[in-house]
Image: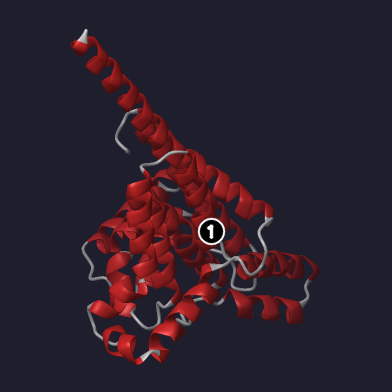
């Protein structure tokens, strides 16, 4: 009788873990839908919140020395994510954890001003409005590197605001996504740390481009990037993306390259969701 009860409890525990892992895909899917529909208020973004947190740390003398430390500074910066991880661990999962995951993902995922600018950019290109085109391009220039075209800027934005967030969420849950979002908002202060944080997801994203794009043409580019040091990450990623998609576009064409690379980025995100869904069904993701 006692053995039967233990087996029943073990079965319930297994079902609970499986359901909890399935919630991973559900949370990510719901967050992406919410971001796409733009139902959250404009203030619901990680960047201004992280900025206020960073300012508070700098203004308090007790925290300032720790904040400026090379090792403890970043740890102090992501302290809210560490606290969130502890609270979620104590809570033990359930519906509450799913709601928290969705809230955190909607906070960290997406870049609404750039999304609007991209739409304006395409509309301006269609009607030949050079002034509006330049204005939208100015907003889209997330990376100041001179070799980054608008299409490459879009790939880099998609990676930082969608793919990398999803990657760290799959690995470490809501706390992982929050930690990445906070560090991303202060990327200029910790460029080398961000390069290491993004080393693995960047190569995973690059491999996704191979699978959804031109595999044989992009494989050499991915292999070249694979062994490189974590620096100039945006150039490394876009090198793979351009190889995976036929973007040999006329220099006067302001629209086609961006459209092709946007479609490549979208396909890579769909692939990520499919892979995560399959991994949860097979029990590889807990």
Residue at 21% x, 63% y is 227
Q: Nearer the viewer, residue 207 or 42?
A: 42
Q: Eyeballing the image, is 236 above or below 187?
A: above
| Residue 128 place in picture, x, y as percent | 78, 72
Which of these two is toward me, 4 or 64? 4
The quarter of the image holding the N terminus is: top left
Helix, strand or loop at mark 1: helix
Please tell me how many numbered marks the rendered image carries: 1
Image quarter (top left, top right, bottom left or bottom right) of the C terminus: top left
**Residue appearing at x 27%, y 89% in the figure:** 65
Residue 223 seen in the figure: yes
| Residue 238 percent across, percent down from the top left | 42, 65
Q: Would you call the spot at circle 1 few (<14 residues within 10 Å), some (14-19), or many (20 or more)?
A: many
Q: Is residue 254 visible?
A: no
Q: Residue at x 71, y 76 (%)?
A: 133
The way the protein has been coloured in the rendering is: secondary structure
Q: Is residue 9 above or below residue 106?
A: above
According to the image, label 1 marks what residue? 261
Question: In this view, which residue lies farthest toward the right?
Answer: 127
Image quadrant where residue 191 sits: bottom left
Q: Which residue is nearer to you in this view: 175 or 188?
A: 175
Q: Does 220 appear above or below 252?
A: above
Residue at 67% x, 63% y is 41
Outermost residue toward the top in this view: 1
In the rendered structure, the answer to whether residue 258 lies left or right of residue 84 reads: right
């Amino acid at each position: 009788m006692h053995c039967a009860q233990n087996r029943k409890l073990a079965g319930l525990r297994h079902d609970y873990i499986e359901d909890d892992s399935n919630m991973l895909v559900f949370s990510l899917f719901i967050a992406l839908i919410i971001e796409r529909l733009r139902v959250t208020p404009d203030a619901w973004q990680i960047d201004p919140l992280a900025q206020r947190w960073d300012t508070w740390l700098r203004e308090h003398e007790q925290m300032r020395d720790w904040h400026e430390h090379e090792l403890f500074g970043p740890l102090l910066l992501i302290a809210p994510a560490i606290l969130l991880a502890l609270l979620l661990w104590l809570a033990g999962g359930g519906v509450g954890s799913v709601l928290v995951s969705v809230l955190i993902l909607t906070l960290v995922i997406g870049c609404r001003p750039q999304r609007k600018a991209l739409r304006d950019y395409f509309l301006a290109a269609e009607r030949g409005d050079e002034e509006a085109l330049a204005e939208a391009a100015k907003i889209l220039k997330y990376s100041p590197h001179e070799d980054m075209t608008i299409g490459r800027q879009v790939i880099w934005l998609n990676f930082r605001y969608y793919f990398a967030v999803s990657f760290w969420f799959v690995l470490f849950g809501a706390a992982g996504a929050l930690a990445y979002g906070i560090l991303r908002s202060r990327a200029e202060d910790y460029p080398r740390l961000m390069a290491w944080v993004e080393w693995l997801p960047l190569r995973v994203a690059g491999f996704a481009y191979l699978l959804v794009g031109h595999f044989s043409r992009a494989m050499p580019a991915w292999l070249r990037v694979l062994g490189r040091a974590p620096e100039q990450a945006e150039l490394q990623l876009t090198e793979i993306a351009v190889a995976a998609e036929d973007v040999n576009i006329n220099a006067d064409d302001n629209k086609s390259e961006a459209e092709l690379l946007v479609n490549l980025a979208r396909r890579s995100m769909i692939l990520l969701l499919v892979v995560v869904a399959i991994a949860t069904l097979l029990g590889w993701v807990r």
